[in-house]
Image (cartoon, helix red, strand yellow):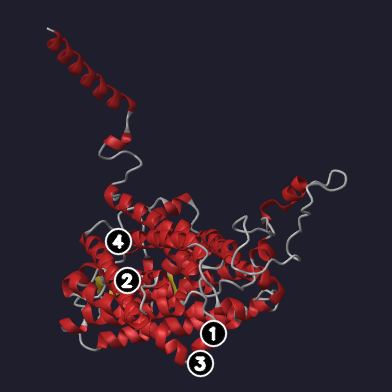
Amino acid sequence: MPLLIINQVHKLSNQNLSTLLMADNLYAYQSDPPAVPVWLNKGDNAWQLVCATFVGLQSMPGLVVLYGSIVKKKWAVNSAFMALYAFASSLIIWVLLAYRMAFGERLLPFWGKAGPALGQSYLIKRASMPATTHFFHNGTVESHMTEPFYAQATLVIFEFMYAAITLILLAGSVLGRMNIKAWMAFSPLWLLLSYTVGAFSLWGGGFLYQWGVIDYSGGYVIHLSSGVAGFTAAYWVGPRLKCDRERFSPNNILLMIAGAGLLWLGWSGFNGGAPYAANLTASVAILTTHICAATSLLTWTCLDVIFFGKPSVIGAVQGMMTGLVCITPGAGLVHAWAAILMGLFSGSVPWFTMMILHKKWSLLQKVDDTLAVFHTHAVAGLLGGILTGFLALPELSSFDLPISGEKGVFYGGGLIQIFKQLMGALFVILWNIMATTTILLSIGWFIPLRMPDNELMIGDDAAHGEEAYALWGDGEKFDATRHETIVHTGATAGDNTVQQQLSNLGARGVTIQL
């Protein structure tokens, strides 16, 4: 009898729930509510927003944590803030002008028409890249323009995350001496005048896209661009202090590894979101991404052990980074075994340029690239683009590339593909050198690009009036000119007690002289 009553109550509850769902019009459970137009694919939309979040986490907090930890303590705040500021400033420029310059209607062969991405009538329509239609030589359409099955707003925020991380990666070359005010002016200008050109040319329907240069997810647009621009910026800004160049040990290696871990796992969204859909290409891309990164990390670590006798943790992070960068141009286009091959190259070639070539080439020694962004991003990005030209698989390429029959040299694509990859890289390199130089020299007329030496000796406290930790560190001797001294006499005349003096120091820290 009690069981019968329970069953009756259960049936009644189910009926009431169904009635409630129908009565309250819970749109999420209906096939076509007003907020879900017929062209919207809920799965693709959800996936793209998740990928955007993953890529965003690579910057905030991934690179913020990594930068703040991998530098000396006196530069922790400044380095982290440069990344934080770049993320915020680039978003405003992106929605005001830059997005449509990168993915809007064609203005020039390498640039789109500027315009805002702010109005709701624009943001809620189906996403599209107007210039991506590809034509045969006879004028007929070969590939229709890219139109993902979600709103334009989704595409705007996803592509912004790519733009922001490019700028933050560039910052790694000038940490530890660039005037923060100069950086505040430089970062939005570089995004507007340099990044948008590479993005439109290779992704938005520009001349490199139409010609068939392969850059699946940013080996050229993001990594080659940030590496070359960072190296150029480091040249114009000038070097760190000699003492900082000779000894620039991380202030927190454990946090550095945590930041690197966010960067690694976030690459699932970085390469998984490149096809603009939750499709087969995304699955392949995520798998090959992690295979290449792991192989590269192990290769770099083994080389450190063979030549230096010890596995370097910083070296392992650099090897991880070069693997992620190298696979990016071809993540969704190559075999999983090819990802292992690319990992072997990405763990050894940048290692050689950093550890061997750097010491023999006077230009590399002259330019103070703080975090070796040139090696980990420019060299690895170029290497990945060339290897993709050899290894791109016809079946996978047909899923993602606009030109039918495009494939790597090893699958019958011919050396013309390598020529295209090299010419595409050359354009990105030259444009970034020119644009970065022009922007920095223009800013230099009004704002010094480099902090003065007396402020470089101090670091964060001089740049921001703040320090990362309330303890003295870095191994330097205590400098009484930077910090108030404490009277060690128990108490002083009047109300000027030791406790009050300690309070006045605030976040600047305390040094106890034994």
Outermost residue, front direction? 514
> Residue 338 appears in which quarter of the rendering?
bottom left
Label 1 vs label 4, nearer the camera: 1
Mark 4 or 2, nearer chain start: 4
Q: Secondary structure at mark 2?
A: helix
Mark number displayed over residue 272: 4
Q: Secondary structure at mark 1?
A: loop
Mark number displayed over residue 367: 1
| Residue 33 percent location from the top left of the image | 31, 38
Label 2 belongs to which residue? 297
Distance from Cα at disc 4 to Cα at disc 2: 21 Å
Tag 1: amino acid: Val
Label 4 vs label 2, nearer the camera: 2
Outermost residue, right direction? 494
| Residue 129 percent location from the top left of the image | 37, 64
Q: Is residue 424 above or below residue 319?
A: below
Mark 3 or 1, nearer chain start: 3
Look at the numbered discs 2 and 3 and tell me whether their residues touch, using CB distance below 8 Å: no
Distance from Cα at disc 1 to Cα at disc 4: 35 Å
